[in-house]
Amino acid sequence: MSLAVVNPMPIQTGQQNAKSMVSIDAVTMSFGSYVAVQDVNLTVADGEFLAIVGPTGCGKSTILNAIAGLLKPASGTVTIDSAPVKGVQNDIGYLFQQDALLPWKTSIENVELGLLFKGVSSAERRERSMNWLAKVGLKGFEHRYPHQLSGGQRKRVQMAQALISGPKVILMDEPFSALDIHTRHLMQNELLRLWQEERRAVVMITHDLEEAIALGDRVAILAAGPRSRVIESFPVELERPRDVAEIKLDPRFMDLYRNIWASLRGEVEKSYERRD
Ligand SMILES: Nc1ncnc2c1ncn2[C@@H]1O[C@H](COP(=O)(O)OP(=O)(O)O)[C@@H](O)[C@H]1O
Ligand SMILES: [Mg+2]
């Protein structure tokens, strides 16, 4: 397993010098005759947090599923750590918008699942899961079932579940969009705290531009579909650690927001026009 690259400087911004962890080369994704995304090129460095924004239906989840190996590109290649993606990947942590917890399993049993599939012994599974639940602030909640937890707590269990196996790449599909704004800020800060401890390559997709800027090292904009492509990519040179609620008040954040919105806005409008 490769360790995340940690910048020795106390103020960390981009990860320009790190090796490429995810590489998407000339990828086209189709569903029958419908071409959702066409000729997409993107790379994510090891330890880099890439946020992808684009209007609803433009192909964000489709791209994420191609990285995860759940969907096969019509053409082009995806590589992770220099190996071509063929079939479902094991080195990936996936965080979804929906609750992906098994309702009939407790927090700890849910967190243990990833390790179970990897053949880790039961004693080690238990110990590592206990540690991860403590790390996400759920000490004492190990034996609760999902319905006995709040939305934020369930999200914490999901984070532990996604991170426990030390994935090379973390994929996030609008992970916080179902939460109320305060819980969302809390979870975004939690995520940043965990990620700062051990930096991995992250690809997060979102339709929320504020979230993309607050969390990302870089924000890539997708065009409205069909045949969506990356239209522009903006580095976010705001120092870390960040507090997501605070950083939105920073004038540099607002400038960046204005710039990126100028590029994204037209795509959002197009996507509305195409809807009947
Ligand atoms: N399994 C599928 N079959 C047919 N069309 C699909 C399928 N999955 C997604 N699409 C279409 O591809 C486009 C991109 O979808 P998706 O990646 O889910 O968008 P996003 O995540 O950006 O909202 C949409 O127009 C959607 O209707
Ligand atoms: Mg989606």
Image (cartoon, rainbow, N blue to C red):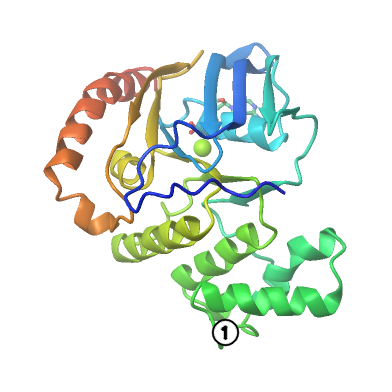
Residue 105 at what x, y percent from top left? 72, 74
Residue 166 can be seen, yes or no: yes
Q: What residue type is labelled 1?
A: Phe
Whether residue 88 sits left or right of residue 37 in the image: it is right
Identify residue for label 1.
141
Residue 30 at what x, y percent from top left? 64, 17
The total of numbered circles placed on residues is 1
Task: Determine which quarter of the picture holds residue 222.
Answer: top left
Q: Report the front residue among 74 and 200.
A: 200
Q: Does the residue labelled 1 lie within 8 Å of ligand 2?
A: no
Residue 141 at what x, y percent from top left? 57, 84
In the image, farthest residue toward the front: 8
Q: How crowded is mark 1: few (under 14 residues within 10 Å), some or many (20 or more)?
A: some
Give the quarter the ligand 1 occupies.
top right
Residue at the spot 53% in from the left edge and 32% down from the top edge: 44
Q: Is residue 257 above or below residue 26?
A: below
Whether residue 145 sits left or right of residue 114 in the image: it is left
Residue 8 at what x, y percent from top left? 43, 50
Q: Is residue 39 above or below residue 248?
A: above
Q: Report the front residue among 112 and 45.
A: 45
Residue at the spot 37% in from the left edge and 61% down from the top edge: 189
Q: Report the front residue among 139 and 32.
A: 139
Indicate the secondary structure of the residue bearing disc 1: loop
Residue 100 can be seen, yes or no: no
Whether residue 213 sits left or right of residue 54 in the image: it is left
Task: Determine which quarter of the picture holds residue 209.
Answer: top left
